[in-house]
Image (tube, rainbow, N blue to C red):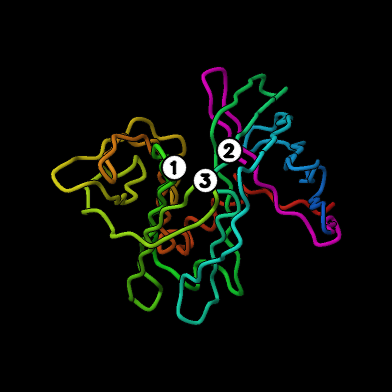
Amino acid sequence: MSLTGPRGSAWAMTERPARRLHRDADHFVVGPSGLRWDGDTLVIEIAEISAPLPYKVRGTVRVRPEMIGTTAFALDPAGRHRWHPVAPHAQVEVAMTHPGMRWSGPGYFDSNFGDEPLEDGFDDWHWSRAHLKSDVAVLYEGVRRDGTPFDLALKFDAQGRWHDVMQPAPAALPRTGWLIKRATRADAGHAARVIKTWIDAPFYARSALSTRLFGEDVQAVHESLALGRFRSPIVQSMLPYRMPRAIW
C-alpha cells in the first residue's frame, strides 16, 4: 500500500508465503491485513510494517461502491492479462492511526490479474482516471512485450454501464526524477500538467494531473509503469529493500 498526505506518508508491500493467504466469498486475508465485506461496504484492515525504514502502518479504509463493475477487460489478444474496474464510482473513508490521518471523498477501486508476470507481457503502460461531472473516464495505453501497442478508453456512468470513447490527443508530460517516461491524453489544444508526483520509483510513478478531458477541466490520477526497467538486474537487486519477503 501507498499512503500520501499532508501529515505523513507510508509505504508497505511485503511478499508472504501461500500459507498466510486465506479467502472465501466475503474475506481475503494476507498475513495481518485483509479485506472483508460489511454489508455494502468493502472494509480494508491494514496492519503492516513499512520499508526500508521499519515503522507501523495501521488503519482502516472503507470503500462503499456506488455500483459493482461486472466486466473484466483483456489487455492482450490471448487474455493472459485482465483489468477489472470493480468500483469505478465509490465513496471512500480512510482512518489511519499510524501515521495519524483521516480522509473521505470520491474514489475508485480496480484490480489487475493474469496468468503470467506483468513483465512477461508488457514493456510499459500509462493509465489515468478522472471523475467527470457525470462519468468516470479511464484511459489505458502502452506497449506489449512483443512490440504491439494497446489502448483502451472508456467512460463509466453511475450505474456502472460503460462504453468505448475516442482516445483524446497525446499530451506530453515531463519525465520523473528516475527518468521514467510519462505519457497521457488531453483534449486537442490543451496541455496536461503534473500537480504532484506521489510515487517516484525506478520503474513506477503515480501522479496527480491537471488536464482537460471530454470538454471538462479535471484532476486525474495517473500512473506510468516501465517494465523494461523493472526487468533490469539493477532494479531487481533493489526490490527487497522496498518489497521485503516474509517467511512467516
> How far apart, in angstroms, are the residues tagged by discs 3 and 1?
25 Å
Q: Position of residue 231 (x, y in %)?
A: 47, 64
Q: What residue type is disc 1 on?
A: Arg
Which callout, 2 or 3, points at the residue further toward the start of the chain?
A: 2
Mark seen at residue 206: 1
Which image quadrant is residue 9 in? Answer: top right
Whether 186 is among the magenta residues is no
Q: Could you give the CA–CA distance between mark 2 and mark 3, rounded to whole angstroms? A: 27 Å
Q: Which residues are magenta?
A: 1-24
Q: Secondary structure at mark 3?
A: loop
Label 2: which secondary element: strand
Mark 3 highlights which residue?
158
Q: Is residue 58 above or below residue 27?
A: above
Q: Position of residue 86 (x, y in %)?
A: 60, 54
Please state which amino acid type lies under the numbered disc 3: Ala
Of residues 12 and 89, which is closer to you in this image?
89
Identify the amino acid type marked 2. Answer: Ser
> Which of the two labelled residues, at mark 2 and mark 1, occupies the earlier sequence position?
2
Residue 2 marker: 2
